[in-house]
Image: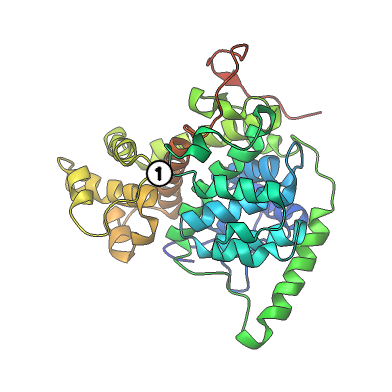
Amino acid sequence: MRFIETVAPREAGGLVGRVYGEVKHDFALLRDPDGNSPFLAHSPHPELLAGMWSVLYETVLVEGAVCRADKEAIAAAVSRTNDCPFCVEAHALLSGVAGAASDRGALITGNVAGIADGRRRELAAWAAATREPNSELVRSPPFEQAQAPEVIGTAFAFHYINRVVEVFQGHGGMQVGPAPVRGAVMTFVGSVAGRAMRRRREPGRTLGLLADGELADDLGWARPAPAIAAAVARFAAAVERAGEDALSERERARVTSALAARNGTDPPLVGGWVDAALDGLEPGERGRARVALLAALAPYRVDDEAVRAFGERASDRDLVGAVAWAALAAARRIASWLAPPQPTSAPSGASLRAASPPG
């Protein structure tokens, strides 16, 4: 793990320990042998760890209107369009375990036509187009209104997670041991994940991890599924608090403005777009805003120099908070154009107070 000290599973207590326990029980894959994991990357900020896990559980792991294999295929396809090899490999594996084993290779290479199931092919193709607001697939999505919270929620979650992974883990795939034994290790990982998939998961079970929150208008695609809406609202509120702690209003505004200008496209590999976006900020502000801007638009470019400029006195919690805020801002921007047209009888855009946890 880069830039931060994570909480090791054996040392975890409190909220972090509780979430780690739930992840191991329901997801099985807490970390790879080298200690890489989006869960560990969030561990310096327990509230964000809990929120991220809740969104993943309620959206991807609970099977409702969409099967797990389809959602894992969406996760892999989104991760490939974001060039996040760790997430591509992990979720291609999980899609293959939950559905057709042959899909794993197709998802890793991006060969959507090679996916066995026709419905899964449609969803993977849609997921690969989610950064293109003018795409015909995005304009006419291959799912119904009732399926939107799970389908869009999965894409939303991985547009966020991919950015966090690229910043804190770097650009690399799953580390599963020396080459001669990797096949056996992946088979074992798949069998463990398969056993976890067969466990029953109740919607709303993770909602007690965080206080409730208001579902913002741009997250209204989650509204038809109360447990998903509640998890997304809680996580968004926690990320907003973390962003306010780590970044000033001026710093956050620069990131928001840059995201609006890109509209899903990658920034140039070279050129002064970063400096132009930060023009007029004070030196300290520039360092913090640079990390956030890169996390949102080019996470692979966050390096030691950028993190040093973020602030020598900044805590790991601050750095995770800033990256999480920027990553979620990018994910929210993308998700805002993914929702299918609302029927005329749909509720107004007023904020929804998220549902309380069951029991």
Residue lying at the far left in this picture: please name it. Answer: 280
Tell me the residue at 39%/36% (across/down).
244
Look at label 1 and name its amino acid.
Answer: Ala
Q: In this figure, which residue is indicated by the disc labeled 1? A: 326
Q: How is the image coloured?
A: rainbow
In front of the other: 261 or 162? 261
In front of the other: 231 or 341? 341
From the image, which quarter does the C terminus lie in? top right
Task: Give the percent coordinates (x, y) of residue 341.
Answer: 55, 24
Q: Is residue 18 visible?
A: no
Task: Give the percent coordinates (x, y) of residue 211.
Answer: 62, 30
Q: Is residue 150 left or right of residue 3?
A: right
| Res. 25 image quadrant | bottom right
Q: Disc 1 on helix, strand or loop?
A: helix
Tell me the residue at 75%/67% (across/down).
190
Residue neighbourhood size for the residue with mark 1, other residues' Cα within 10 Å, grouped as few (<14), some (14–19), many (≥20): many
| Res. 354 image quadrant | top right
Tell me the residue at 76%/36% (across/down).
203
Q: Is residue 162 above or below residue 11?
A: above
Task: Give the percent coordinates (x, y) of residue 323.
Answer: 42, 49
Task: Give the percent coordinates (x, y) of residue 193.
Answer: 76, 61
Q: Is residue 227 visible?
A: yes
Tell me the residue at 63%/33% (across/down).
148
Q: Please give the count of numbered marks on the rendered protein.
A: 1
